Image: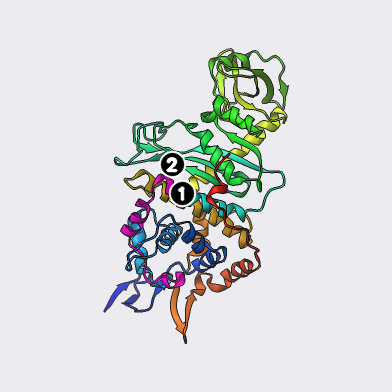
Amino acid sequence: MRGEISAIFGGKKVELRETARAVTPFGGLVVFVEFLRRVGFAEQVRGAMPFELKSPNAIPAVETYTAFVISVVVGARRFAQTGLMKADQALQRVLGMKRFPSDDTIRNLFKRFSQGAVYRFYSVLWGWQLERLEPRAEGWSLDLDSVVFERYGRQQGARKGHNPKKHGRPSHHPLLAVLAECHFILHGWLRSGNCGAARGAVEFLKEALALLRQRHRLRIVRADSGFFEDGLLSFLEERQLNYIVVARLTRWLKRQAAQIQQWRALDDNYAVGEFRLQLYGWEQQRRFVVIRERVQEDKASLGRKLLDLPGYTFRLFVTNSLQTPEEVWRDYNQRADVENRIAELKYDLAADDFCLQEFFATEAAFCAILLLFNLLGEFQRATAMKGYRQPATLRTQVFLCGAVLGRAGHRIVLHLSESWGGLSQRKPLLDNLLLYRFSTSPKLEIGQIIPP
């Protein structure tokens, strides 16, 4: 079959023909596929998979799960879009799959997950990833945050709750714990949309801390005002963990902040102060750090105004850290980077778009994307990339490369397009993978991660 079109500029005729050769736009994925092979991804998923398919015609669960992960890497944003990869025979050969699962097959895999299966499966995989994460001498900064996933339907757990963009729209309200310095998602829960930010935060942290075990330690735990609750603060103090949490400006805290007499100026616009206070229902006093900012016409302020002190805005933090007030403020400001991680999950990896009717099926897909996010971060460390790159940047700069599948005798050959950077651009990444030393520590067992 032939066809013909004319070029937009110049009007030159372009003849159209078909080819029987397998062509892929994602030839650059060979580097990531080699990384997955070297870390033993397929073996870990196969060993942790909580069920086994018995049908002789069924695609193995590990291949279906891998197909979903690869589909998200290349840009799929719906389950229906994962099925488009069935036409990419070149990528299937690179992965070693005889056939690529349909979108219904991928949906049915996640529908098999119950609450217990999600916990058992992903606990092992998160522990496996943490074993390869080099400890940080000064400890990690753990940032807690929640995010709203809008839903358009009647999925399980989709409830009306806090939704800053689409008021009244049903949603899910996931909870995340992120190790800031290494861009690593330590833990994640999917929750119903009517949950408050701190709902279940203590149990969530127990699971997250159990994953860390003795190999890693935390320097500080940081959270916004949604987590300003006595139960969470008491738990962190019981575990002897330092924390910085934005205080919710209640009437009592506003009154106490207005009564501060000793302010220490940092510059012409900022001053700091502090006080200790035991709020109603608390069993002890806690330290509050106050940042006072002069109102400026040409600059927006994040703080709140107090009627008793016009001309200023105030931000309050509760902390058990021994840092000076300005150090507490600057430390907490580093937490803003967690918003970038959430944006990458939503806009680069479509974490909010893979939704099924069953709640735990949706959570299983959500956790798969969190797992992928960590793998992409480790991939960058293993290939010695300079600086951190967002998933979408990796997709366009590394993974996107036209390639044609061929043979040389009995060997499969993938010809990478030179005009897309070809092998010359990706060979240094492959060489760095060969030099990178992956951890060979034993696989984490389920019993090891249950919190005491």
Q: Nearer the viewer, residue 292 or 60?
A: 60
- Residue 8 magenta-highlighted: no
Q: Nearer the viewer, residue 156 or 308?
A: 156
Q: Position of residue 200 (x, y in %)?
A: 48, 33
Q: Nearer the viewer, residue 220 or 123?
A: 123
Q: Tell me the residue that label 2 is attached to.
A: 190
Q: Nearer the viewer, residue 91 or 417?
A: 91
Residue at (44, 71) in percent of width and height: 96
The answer to which image quadrant residue 330 occupies is top right
Q: Position of residue 443 (x, y in %)?
A: 57, 57
Answer above or below: position of 25 versus 201.
below
Colour scheme in use: rainbow
Asked if labels 1 and 2 touch by Cβ distance under 8 angstroms, the answer is yes
Disc 2/disc 1 C-alpha distance (Å): 9 Å
Answer above or below: position of 273 versus 37.
above
Look at the image and tell me in which quarter the N terminus lies: bottom left
What secondary structure characterizes most of the magenta part? helix
- Direction from residue 185 to residue 74 in the image, left or right: left
* Magenta stretch in the rendered image: 92-118
Q: Position of residue 203 (x, y in %)?
A: 52, 36
- Residue 103 magenta-highlighted: yes
Assess disc 1: are there few (<14), some (14-19) or many (≥20) residues with their C-alpha within 10 Å of its C-alpha.
some
Residue at (65, 31) in percent of width and height: 329
The answer to which image quadrant residue 85 occupies is bottom left
Q: Amino acid at mark 1?
A: Cys
Q: Tell me the residue that label 1 is attached to.
A: 367
**Which mark is first along the chain, 1 or 2?**
2
Label 2: state its secondary structure. Answer: loop
Look at the image and tell me in which quarter the C terminus lies: top right
Assess disc 2: are there few (<14), some (14-19) or many (≥20) residues with their C-alpha within 10 Å of its C-alpha.
many
Badge number at residue 443: none
Residue at (31, 45) in percent of width and height: 357
